[in-house]
Image (cartoon, grey):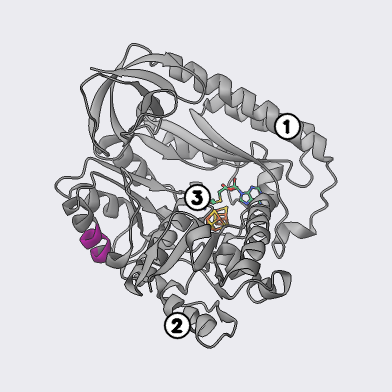
Amino acid sequence: MTKRFFIQTWGCQMNDHDGEKLTGVMVQEGYVEVNSSKEADVVILNTCSIREKAVHKVFSELGRLKKEKLQRPLTIGVTGCLAQQEQSHLFTRAPQIDFVLGTMALEKLPHILSQAQIKGEKGIDVEHYPDNHLFPTEIAKRKPTAKALVTIIEGCNHACTYCIVPRTRGIERSRPYQSIIDEVIRLIDQGYREIELLGQNVNSYAGGCNFTELLRRVSALKGLEWLRFTTSHPMNFTKELAHEIVTNPRIAPFLHLPVQSGSNAVLKRMLREYTIEEYLERLDYLGSSRSSICLSTDFIVGFPGETESDFQQTLDLLDYVQFESSFSFIYSLRPGTAAVRLKDDLPAEVKQERLVRLQSRQAHWTLLDNQNMIGKVVDARIENPILNENGFWVGRMGSSKTLHLKEKVGYIPQMGELVSARITAASPHFLGAELV
Ligand code: SAH
Ligand code: SF4
Ligand code: F3S
């Protein structure tokens, strides 16, 4: 009888890619992937624990699966960052779970699964396998997307006081560059034209060359059109890297450089290792080419002890740099992190109100930038060749901006195709465009 599985993934792109690796392992074990938990014999929740909300989503799904399990045989597994963080405590909190697999143990899935299914025992492997970054990626089963994700470094050696990631992903391990090159060549052969290199901190890459050199080597591969990477820590952002980004035409003109706060007092408590002056100095490395790069960042609001004046400095920084885009979050206490010891007495309404102010200020700058694009002709990659509910094809520019392309009668775009488009309309979230 066919054995069927379903994986639900939350979190960052690295976790998405881990989901693709787990899918590959399951397919190798003879399982067939299905599109919903209802049709599956094995359900894997590939989790994120970056903020409390992400964890809530997992427990709410576990609650739903518990009911399904009462009606039919079902094996439930938890993988990803919550699995690594909570380990066997998960069995106590949710006894319907059959196995727990940490972020460094993906290759152990068949063993753990058979322990849970054949022996009927709870399966767990949350060991730190220091060479898990050597996972045989040829077995990963990628989603049919326009760009392929490639992990180059796992773990994080920084120690931001709010962040759970060093605990869930371990210390930095860089994949040897030749293995990355071999994988990208294979992906280009399979038809991918865009690659995104992944790591918690890509610019501390050290797998036989530095990150700038890796970008040079990968971008030189024949057939590759755009190379992207995420995420960068400002303290590992060098002049050499900035120069490569602005001069190499195959590196997509986009840089995500998380700043977190505009206040030096808050940055210090976050242990971000830089001051705002040092952050701005790093941006200056981009020189006059800064204007041709889409600059994006992350902000945390309501960090313990953040005063109105600290928050105002964050708004001032946003107005000064005029980031083209940003992701902003209300601080969420993570168990076991150093920030737990800081007094957090800011009322929830104040945090919420600051988030709204920050996001509306960002919408202002993004809209302005988008409006300046109207009339321009740009390259964009088709990310969904099927018309969306409003009758548009979705494309993405090198700068990462989303395009809603008007249908052209008689034209059938291909997934991942690079097209030329004229920008016709702007909103804070996407650009309207037509094919030229
Ligand atoms: N490695 C990346 C960050 C990954 S987490 C880096 O250092 O840039 C992505 C973002 O989530 C962070 O940049 C931060 O803005 C946010 N974040 C992390 N921990 C958080 C927490 N405890 N509460 C709220 N936001 C958090
Ligand atoms: Fe977390 Fe800081 Fe490491 Fe990013 S650099 S993953 S925010 S500890
Ligand atoms: Fe979440 Fe882990 Fe990624 S906590 S953001 S899935 S590294």
Residue 321 among those drawn in magenta: no
Q: Is mark 1 within 8 Å of ligand 1?
A: no
Numbered mark located on residue 111 in the image: 2
| Residue nearest the viewer, comparing 364 with 171 | 364
Residue at position x 49%, y 37% from top?
Answer: 281
Judging by the rendered image, the residue that carries numbered circle 1 is 354
* Whether residue 223 can be seen here: yes
- Mark 2 residue CB less than 8 A from any atom of ligand 3: no
**SS under mark 2:** helix
Reply above or below: 364 against 208: above
Classed neighbour count for the residue bearing mark 2: other residues with Cα under 10 Å, few (<14), some (14–19), many (≥20) = few
Could you tell me how far apart the alpha carbons at marks 3 and 1 are, in whole angstroms?
27 Å
Mark 2 and mark 3: Cα distance apart in space: 40 Å
Please give the residue where the numbered disc 3 appears in the rendered image.
Answer: 235
Q: Residues within 10 Å of mark 1 (few under 14, many from 20)?
A: some
Quarter the N terminus occupies: bottom left
Q: Which residue occupies the foreground of this view, 33 or 88?
A: 33
Side of 181 where 159 appears, left or right: right
Q: Tell me the number on the disc at residue 297.
A: none
In the rendered image of this protein, does residue 262 appear above or below residue 9? above
Q: Which residues are magenta?
A: 178-183
Q: Nearer the viewer, mark 3 or mark 1?
A: 1
